Image (cartoon, grey):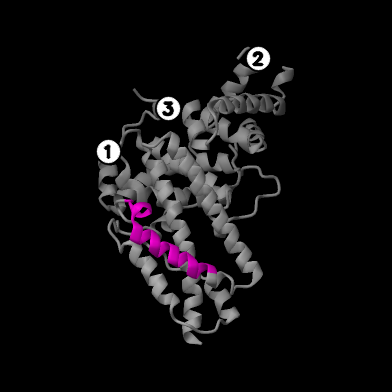
């Protein structure tokens, strides 16, 4: 039975590409990159709130995935496994593990993501980026990318109850920031 | 979820695109860092031994050159044993401990700012290692956590090795 994070990504698992890449086929791994990088980049961007950091984390994530690919046992979907690597990469970066690659946060800390055709998504993106780290991480993982509370709690190294509380907090802050509480 | 704003908020969240294309092609930067699957590279023990051997060469330290060498990207140790029994291998642990002694000796030779930066990096690596160890304790079967735990173990050794080698070349020359 697939978990939430798996269920949301119903695309057919690229088993052959994964196997080829695990065997050292760089072209196959590039195809995996082409297929999965938009989701990984989106995840990194929303977790970091900063474009350059998201680019670095996306690259780090795929490098780490390449190195770890032989250990991928397909107990979860490839995308789920890759997303966990991306989350750990972002968290490690925040801890200063990769201090040499650290970049300054932008003045606003807002993501440079926008749907040119609509102001509303950008408002929401900004409101998400302005959330406190703990609340934002949980909202992004659980509210956007389909992690279960148990998965998110384990990945973030927090208690499941804390995860739920952070989600509740994040949603309340978002509602206030977007003026939804008044409507 | 009895809040009246819950539904409109959920709708807005649901409408956000999950996929966002990177603004530039990140693949060249990734491909440039990938090796062609060296599953079995030089054992890490030998890397540690190489660092120890290098530490035997005496000499004086030229600060400017040292800084340049520390600033330059260090060659990776590039050693990732496919079976991770290093923490339980007495000879490996002894070699690693010796390398740490050399690292500590060399660290004392560095200027305070560089030393502080390296100490901060080491503290961050050790904190991450401990965090992951605790996570592993509650989820011992996680291959990802195991991989990350190995990674921090190797990151610490890489740091030792980089400092020893960065100072080594200078000491050899002078």
The spot of residue A88 in percent (x, y) is 49, 43
Residue A115 falls within the magenta-colored stretch: no
Instruction: For mark 1, give the secondary structure.
Output: helix
Between the C-alphas of marks 2 and 3, the distance is: 25 Å
| Pointer 1 with pointer 2, Cβ within 8 A | no
The magenta segment is B84-104
2 and 3 marks on the same chain:
no
Q: Which SS class for mark 3?
A: loop
Judge left or right: residue B90 versus residue B65.
left
Seen at 53% across and 67% down, the residue is B104
Q: Is residue A134 above or below residue B113?
A: above
Residue at image x 42%, y 52%? B151
Q: Position of residue B162 (x, y in %)?
A: 48, 68
Residue B107 image position (x, y, % from top left) = 56, 69
In the picture of the structure, the residue carrying the numbered disc 3 is A8
Q: Secondary structure at mark 2?
A: loop
Q: Position of residue A113 (x, y in %)?
A: 59, 41
Label 1 and label 2 in one chain? no
* CA neighbours of label 2 inside 10 A, class few (<14), some (14 to 19), many (20+): few
Residue A130, numbered label: none
Q: CA distance from mark 1 to mark 2?
A: 43 Å
Q: Disc 2 is attached to a residue of which chain?
A: B
Chain to which the residue tagged by mark 1 belongs: A
Task: In this rendered view, identify the residue nearer to me: B52 or B3.
Answer: B52
- Give the labeled residue for mark 2: B3
Q: In which quadrant of the rendered view does residue B109 lie?
A: bottom right
**Residue A15's disc number:** 1
Does residue B21 appear in this view? no
Q: Residue at x 63, y 38 (%)?
A: A133
Relative horizontal placement of residue A108, taking residue A32 as reference (left or right): right
């Amino acid at each position: 039975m697939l978990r939430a994070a798996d269920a949301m990504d119903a695309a057919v698992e690229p088993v052959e590409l994964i196997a080829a890449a695990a065997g050292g086929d760089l072209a196959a791994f590039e195809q995996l990159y082409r297929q999965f990088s938009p989701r990984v980049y989106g995840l990194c961007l929303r977790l970091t709130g900063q474009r350059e950091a998201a680019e670095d984390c996306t690259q780090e994530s795929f490098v780490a995935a390449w190195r770890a690919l032989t250990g991928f046992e397909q107990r979860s979907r490839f995308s789920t496994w890759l997303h966990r690597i991306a989350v750990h990469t972002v968290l490690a970066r925040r801890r200063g593990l990769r201090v040499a690659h650290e970049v300054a946060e932008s003045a606003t800390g807002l993501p440079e993501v926008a749907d040119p055709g609509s102001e509303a998504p950008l408002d929401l993106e900004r409101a998400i980026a302005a959330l406190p780290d703990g609340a934002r991480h949980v909202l992004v993982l659980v509210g956007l990318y389909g992690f279960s509370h148990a998965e998110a709690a384990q990945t973030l190294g927090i208690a499941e109850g804390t995860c739920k509380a952070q989600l509740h907090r994040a949603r309340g802050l978002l509602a206030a920031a977007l003026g939804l509480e008044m409507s | 979820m009895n809040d009246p704003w819950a539904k409109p908020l959920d709708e807005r969240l649901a409408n956000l695109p999950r996929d966002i294309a990177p603004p530039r092609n990140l693949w060249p930067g990734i491909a440039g860092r990938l090796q062609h699957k060296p599953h079995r590279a030089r054992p890490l023990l030998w890397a540690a031994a190489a660092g120890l051997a290098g530490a035997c060469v005496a000499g004086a330290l030229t600060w400017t050159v040292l800084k340049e060498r520390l600033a330059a990207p260090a060659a990776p140790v590039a050693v990732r044993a496919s079976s991770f029994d290093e923490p339980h291998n007495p000879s490996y642990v002894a070699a690693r401990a010796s390398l740490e002694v050399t690292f500590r000796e060399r660290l004392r030779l560095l200027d305070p700012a560089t030393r502080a930066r390296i100490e901060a990096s080491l503290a961050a690596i050790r904190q991450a290692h401990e965090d992951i160890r605790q996570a592993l304790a509650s989820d011992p079967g996680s291959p990802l956590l195991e991989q990350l735990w190995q990674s921090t173990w190797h990151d610490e050794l890489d740091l030792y090795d980089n400092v020893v080698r960065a100072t080594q070349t200078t000491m050899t020359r002078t």
